[in-house]
Amino acid sequence: MVIDFNASNSANRGAQTGATMGKRDAAAEGTRPAAQGNAQNTPAEDGQVKLSPQAQQLQAVEERLRELPVVDSERVAQIRQAISDGSYNADSGRIADRLLALE
């Protein structure tokens, strides 16, 4: 069967036989019961969502991350003190490597 893509859609539709369309529709119908029968895709009988163990673990990790401070205040205080008393040594090679890694 040759399909002319330059012709209008109605002309192409007329070229397809009802038997061909029927086979395609039957094939699509045949896949629906398998997808519907999947227990993981069906809602819980009580109408609530049930999370997988992995989703529950992810939620727990996210909760712990939210509790952590954004800035480590103790580390900032240590560095300030080291700068104040002159004991802070900046590693210029490490700084350069990290700057280059940003690009």
Image (cartoon, grey):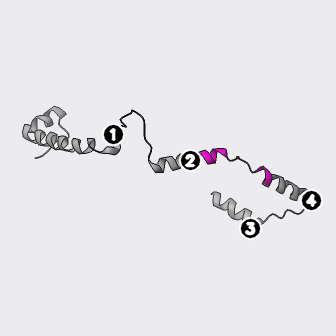
How far is disc 2 from disc 1 in space, using C-alphas? 25 Å
Question: Tags 2 and 3 in contact by the CB under 8 Å rule?
Answer: no
| Residue type indicated by callout 1 | Thr
Q: In this view, does 3 lie to the left or right of 44?
A: left
10 Å crowding of disc 2: few (<14), some (14-19), many (20+): few
Q: Quadrant of residue 29?
A: top left
| Residue type indicated by callout 3 | Gly
Q: Which mark is residue 60?
A: 2
Question: Tags 1 and 4 in contact by the CB under 8 Å rule?
Answer: no
| Residue type indicated by callout 2 | Ala
Dot 1: what SS?
A: loop
Is 96 or 39 nearer to us in this picture? 39
Q: Residue 85 carries which label?
A: 4
Is 76 or 38 nearer to us in this picture? 38
Q: Quadrant of residue 32?
A: top left
How far is disc 2 from disc 4 in space, using C-alphas? 42 Å
State the predominant SS element of the stretch in magenta: helix
The answer to whether residue 9 of the structure is visible from this angle is yes
Q: What stretch is highlighted in magenta?
A: 61-74
Q: Residue 42 carries which label?
A: 1
* Disc 3: which residue: 93
Tell us which disc is closer to us: 3 or 4. 4
Question: Tags 2 and 1 in contact by the CB under 8 Å rule?
Answer: no
10 Å crowding of disc 1: few (<14), some (14-19), many (20+): few
Vertical side of 94 occupied by 27: above or below: above
Q: Where is residue 96 in the image (x, y as percent from the top left)?
A: 72, 63
Asked if the magenta segment contains residue 70, the reply would be: yes
| Residue type indicated by callout 4 | Asp
The answer to whether residue 8 of the structure is visible from this angle is no
Tell us which disc is closer to us: 2 or 4. 2
